[in-house]
């Protein structure tokens, strides 16, 4: 048996090994959210009012299952850790659901098409929630020091942006030109199969690379209703949650409507969405380096508020874009604001988790993050209602019945609605008092105790 001093830190997870997991979790859900309107509404002819109804039901179900999944994760005690089993199970299930989602039989119509859409949309979101509740909970656990946490978060957001290039910018080209055509669905099935295999492999690699803190599993298993009551009584949960939901909902609208903005508002083939999406994503990736430096000098809270304002203002020039060139220039501004929110929003949420653990002595990141996920799940309601409003205001009901002003409709959907949401979020962020992060001494204490528990576990295994 090899002895090791208990004061020597246990082997830490390299930030990139954790961060790469974001690549795997992002590919499936971003293809789903980025192509579901094009696939079901514009190509298969699902009415936008039916789509909105399904999305509202789906959001309600998802808001309920999120806290339950997070709670079960917090209570999990296995030799493989609390989070790893859920990640290993959830990855192939999400991949299978995504493939089915984009494999609707051509014979389906009416109620059959609605049921297929509803069932697999809900399954995809449930398994995505399972993955992200556990993946997100690992960030504050693996990286208690905020500077190292900021690096890990920036890296994972960088991997997310790479995933966005693949799942958003490249997807229109693959589905409509390489594996299929503008008016068929076969390309979506092939693309989903490829993405599902890649995502599963990456998530499994990350799950087996992450070294969970064994001390976090030693506390009493949290109880559901007392913990949930503590969370909803925390004013920071509501204020930061609502502000974060404004940002997330705005970007969900952009994600869902960009391909149809290109088709109708710019009058270009859908495949041209590749250039606009790539511009936003590349700009966002480059901006992460700059925003991380701003965080180190000014702090996460200041940087978060600044990024909110820039993101809100960026939608103004995008509204007035008349062709691909002007849209690309506007996309650069969107990328700058989006990059700032990527670099800061999760750090603000992690501070709330740190504050809760410090005050209550329990690490219940899974349930807490899933409760925050409740606000994120409002995206489904907001995107559904926003799309339904296009039918009421502009006559766009589906690809078969686009009305007389689809160009204006998708300028409103992609620019005006996100601008309003981000403006509300920026105002809220200005007045929110963000909790302090862990001090250096507290972070060192977490790492030392992890080393003690890790050594003891190694010794027990060796004996």
Image (cartoon, rainbow, N blue to C red):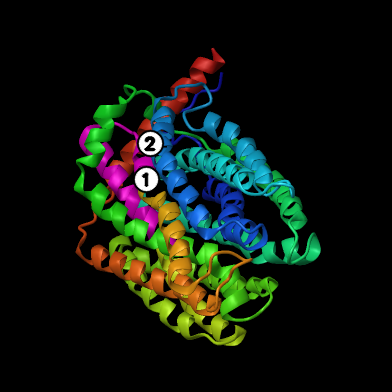
Q: Are marks 1 and 2 in contact (CB under 8 Å)?
A: yes
Q: Nearer the viewer, residue 361 or 231?
A: 231
The residue positioned 27% from the left and 31% from the top of the image is 227
Locate residue 234 relative to residue 311 in the image: left or right.
left
For disc 1, the marked residue is 374
Can residue 452 be seen by looking at this rendering? no
Q: Secondary structure at mark 2?
A: helix
For disc 2, the marked residue is 67
Q: Which mark is residue 455?
A: none
Locate residue 311 relative to residue 407 in the image: left or right.
left
Instruction: Reply yes or no: does residue 352 show up in magenta.
Output: yes
Residue 137 location in percent, x, y? 42, 40
Instruction: Give the spatial CA distance, label 1 vs label 2.
Output: 8 Å
- Picture quarter containing residue 431? bottom left
- The residues colored magenta run 342-371
Residue 238 location in percent, x, y? 25, 50
The residue positioned 38% from the left and 62% from the top of the image is 247
Q: Nearer the viewer, residue 304 or 239?
A: 239
């Amino acid at each position: 048996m090899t002895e090791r001093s208990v004061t020597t830190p246990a082997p830490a997870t390299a930030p990139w090994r954790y961060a790469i997991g974001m690549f795997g979790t992002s590919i499936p859900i971003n293809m789903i959210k980025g192509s579901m309107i094009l696939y079901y509404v514009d190509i298969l002819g699902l009415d936008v009012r039916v789509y909105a109804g399904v999305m509202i039901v789906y959001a309600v179900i998802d808001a309920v299952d999120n806290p339950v999944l997070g709670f079960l994760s917090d209570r999990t005690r296995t030799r493989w850790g609390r989070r790893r089993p859920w990640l290993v199970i959830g990855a192939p299930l999400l991949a299978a659901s995504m493939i089915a989602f984009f494999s609707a039989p051509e014979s389906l119509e009416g109620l059959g098409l609605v049921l297929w859409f509803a069932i697999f949309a809900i399954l995809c979101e449930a398994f995505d929630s399972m993955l992200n509740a556990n993946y997100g909970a690992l960030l504050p656990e693996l990286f208690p020091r905020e500077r190292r946490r900021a690096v890990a978060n920036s890296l994972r957001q960088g991997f997310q942006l790479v995933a966005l290039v693949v799942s958003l910018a490249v997807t229109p080209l693959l589905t409509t030109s390489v594996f299929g055509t503008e008016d068929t669905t076969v390309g979506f099935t092939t693309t989903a199969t490829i993405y599902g295999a890649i995502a599963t492999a990456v998530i499994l690699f990350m799950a087996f690379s992450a070294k969970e803190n064994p001390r976090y599993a030693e506390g009493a298993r949290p109880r559901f209703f007392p913990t949930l009551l503590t969370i909803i009584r925390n004013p920071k949960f509501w204020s930061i949650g609502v502000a974060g939901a404004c940002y997330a909902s705005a970007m969900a609208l952009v994600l869902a409507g960009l391909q149809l903005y290109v088709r109708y508002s710019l009058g270009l083939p859908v495949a041209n969405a590749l250039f606009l999406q790539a511009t936003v994503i590349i700009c966002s990736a480059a901006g992460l380096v700059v925003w991380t430096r701003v965080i180190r000098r000014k702090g996460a809270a200041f940087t978060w508020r600044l990024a909110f304002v820039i993101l809100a203002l960026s939608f103004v020039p995008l509204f007035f874009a008349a062709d691909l060139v002007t849209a690309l220039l506007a996309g650069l501004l969107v990328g700058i604001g989006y990059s700032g929110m990527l670099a800061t929003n999760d750090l603000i949420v992690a501070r709330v988790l740190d504050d809760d653990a410090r005050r209550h002595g329990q690490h219940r990141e899974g349930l807490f993050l899933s409760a925050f996920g409740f606000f994120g799940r409002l995206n489904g309601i907001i995107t559904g209602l926003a799309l339904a409003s296009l039918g009421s205001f502009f006559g766009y009901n589906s690809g078969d019945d686009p009305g007389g002003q689809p160009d204006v409709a998708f300028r409103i959907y992609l620019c005006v609605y996100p601008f309003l949401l981000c403006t509300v979020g920026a105002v809220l962020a200005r007045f929110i008092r963000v909790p302090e992060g862990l001090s250096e001494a507290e972070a060192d204490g977490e790492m030392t105790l992890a080393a003690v528990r890790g050594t003891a576990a190694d010794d027990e295994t060796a004996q």
